[in-house]
Every structure is written in structure tokens, then in C-alpha cells.
Amino acid sequence: MIKIRKVESEKDRMEFIRFPWEIYKGDPYWVPPLIFDVRKNLDPNKNPFFKHAEVQLFLAEKDGKLAGRIAAIKNDNHTDFHKDNAGFFGFFESIDDEDVSDLLFDTACEWVKSKGLTSILGPVNPSTNDECGLLVDGFDSSPVFLMTYNPKRYIKMIENFGFEKAKDMYAYYIPASVINDTKMMAKLERMSELIKKRSDITTHNVNMKDLTNEVRRIEEIYNSAWESNWGFVPITTAEFDYLAESLKMVVDPDLVMFAEVAGKPAGFSLALPDFNQVLKKMNGRLLPFGFLKILTQKKKIDFLRVIIMGVKPEYQKKAIDSVFYLEVIKNGNKNGYTGAEISWVLEDNMPMRMTAEKLGAHIYKTYRIYRKDLI
């Protein structure tokens, strides 16, 4: 017998958070999240996402044993921006039983429908500004920092329920051979200098001593640069501050940079060390030795993720993204990173894809957002 229940107590919430350890037991590629972080992100009193959104968590039981979980999400900022009357599902996990997954999806769909919404998208955890997408290709390695991972069988579960592809997102891999190619780097250097001179472009790294003001500059660029992207939702000031505080410990200032054109803010690029290399060894726990592991292992990280690269619309034809890529590769090489992932890139973002491919990067993972009409 399968039963669905709402998460209503702190005990329920911890069961929801810990359930993935059952699903991924023995999986060499899974990276356990920090329980502390997941708990904080799901706390309406701590995560400013909840100021404009409503999330209901559900647990599934089969024969009295925990068998799955899902979140149903109503994001008012998304609805206000896109006018598409869509809700979301996220944090989906299930045992290998389509009766369980079907009941979880049905429950999330009914909850979203009860809020007056007419379609559902997912997975998003809990929005497109967070970890999102189902891994559908590239199961032979661990995910990088803030990217998702799931069993291959979830594809069949989601599609058999009636979800259809809404959009694919790619992860590009830049191998060490590109980073160590001196001829390629010299060519990129010359090209970058020409681009800078032609359009009066200057770049500088983030000033960690003035982080409050730097975050405001990032917020202004981000919400302008990405507003025409599929799935974009403006990030509020409170959310930016929350995100900056969360990432402060993992940031390498040499990999965070601004571009200006004639002295005016034009673009922003953020690459982060692949902190999953550390998290994989911590099994979700900060105590008793987690902080020590963070401090000792952080310097050993040899891979990075180019997570954000955006240019304001009025400057988008000045090839600023090429300048950013060169700076990231150059500084990454200097700091001991031997490879990089660019993610995620929308399947129809051809300018970004072409720039990545010209650098020698290739697609090695594909993530998918699904959609289903509810009427």
C-alpha cells in the first residue's frame, strides 16, 4: 500500500532531507549535499525565496517504509514575470517503482492545480536560480558544484507520467589540453586585447573587502543581462544577499570578474571551484571534522565551473564573453585548475554555444526541464 503525506513537522522535514541517502547508497558518482545547507534552503524563515513563493513538501510511504519525496512549488515572481500560470515540482526522489513516482507526481500536480495554476514544470530545486534540471545524458561522472544528479530511471518515470521536454540545458567540458595549449592561449590573448581596445573594455576582479556593494553591482547586471533568457526569474535583493553569504566560503576572487565599457558596468562572470570534490568526502556533515576538511581540501580542488557569464543587452555584440573566457582560463591555470565545466547553457543559446565550442569545449552532460499541462 502506497500513502502520501505532507511534511508538517521537523521530524518529517529531516526525513525528507535524508531520504536521498537511501536512493544513492553505493552510487560512486553521487555527491551528498550538506544537510545544514538543505535544511536552511527549505526553511521559510531563512530562505528569502519563500517571501514570494509557496512550497509544499510531500513524502511517499510504501508498506510503512519511506519510498519517495517531492516538492510542489508556486513561485509568484515567475508567474508575474512570465505570465504563464505555471507551477513547479522539485526535490524529486523515488524508489524503483512507478506506482510510487506516479502518485508523487499526481500529488504535486494536484497541489499546483489547487493554486489556480494551469501547467507544471520541473525539476527545479526550488527555482531556475537554484539547482535545476534532470540529468538525461552523462551519467559516467559526478556532477560539479550546484549541478544535479539522478538515477537514469527517473527519465522513464517522468516521461511515462506524461511530462514532455520543455528545454534542454548543456554542460560543456573544457579539458586540460585546451588550458595547456600555449598556441591557443596566445591566439586568445591577442584576440582579447583587440576586443578590449576596439570597444574600450576593461575588466577587474571582485573586491571581497567591498562585497556588499559588489553584490549590488552583480544584481543590477544579472537582472538586466538574463531577462530575455528562457526560464529567467529576477532575483530579489534579499535573495542575492542570501546567495552571496552562502557562496562566500567557496569563492576564488580571481575567478569572479566585472567588465566595463567606457567605465560603465557591462557584464559579469562567475566561476567557482568545484566544491563537490570536497563535499563528496563529507557525507553531508559539517561536524565533527567538516570545517577542517573544507579548509584542508579546498586548496586541492583542481576543477572549476563557469556558472554565470552575462552581458547587458546593449553590450552583447562586443564579444565580452570571449574576454571573460580568456580571463577565467588564464586565472584558473595560474591557480592550479586543470579543467572546467561551463554550465548550464540553454540548447538554443547559439552565441554562447559557439563561443564555448571555439574554445575547444564539448557537451558532455545534458539536463532537461519537463512540462505538463494540467487542464
Image (tube, helix red, strand yellow):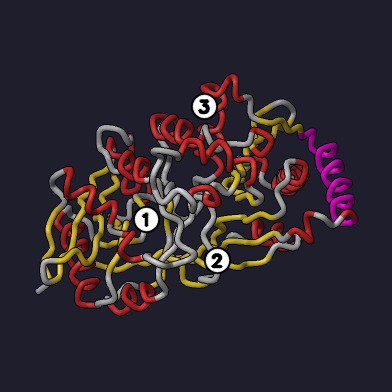
**Which residue is the site of mark 1?**
124
As measured in the structure, the alpha-carbon distance from the residue carrying label 1 to the one carrying label 2 is 21 Å
**Which residue is the site of mark 3?**
216
As measured in the structure, the alpha-carbon distance from the residue carrying label 3 to the one carrying label 2 is 36 Å
Q: Earlier in the sequence, mark 1 or mark 2?
A: 1
- Nearer the camera: disc 1 or disc 3: 1
Q: Earlier in the sequence, mark 3 or mark 2?
A: 2
Residue 196 within the segment the image draws in magenta:
yes
Give, as a three-letter code, the residue at label 1: Val
Residue 273 at x, y percent in the picture: 60, 45
For the C terminus, which image quadrant? bottom left
**Which residue is the site of mark 2?**
141
- Nearer the camera: disc 3 or disc 2: 2
Under circle 3, the secondary element is: helix
Residue 64 at x, y percent in the picture: 11, 66
- Nearer the camera: disc 1 or disc 2: 2
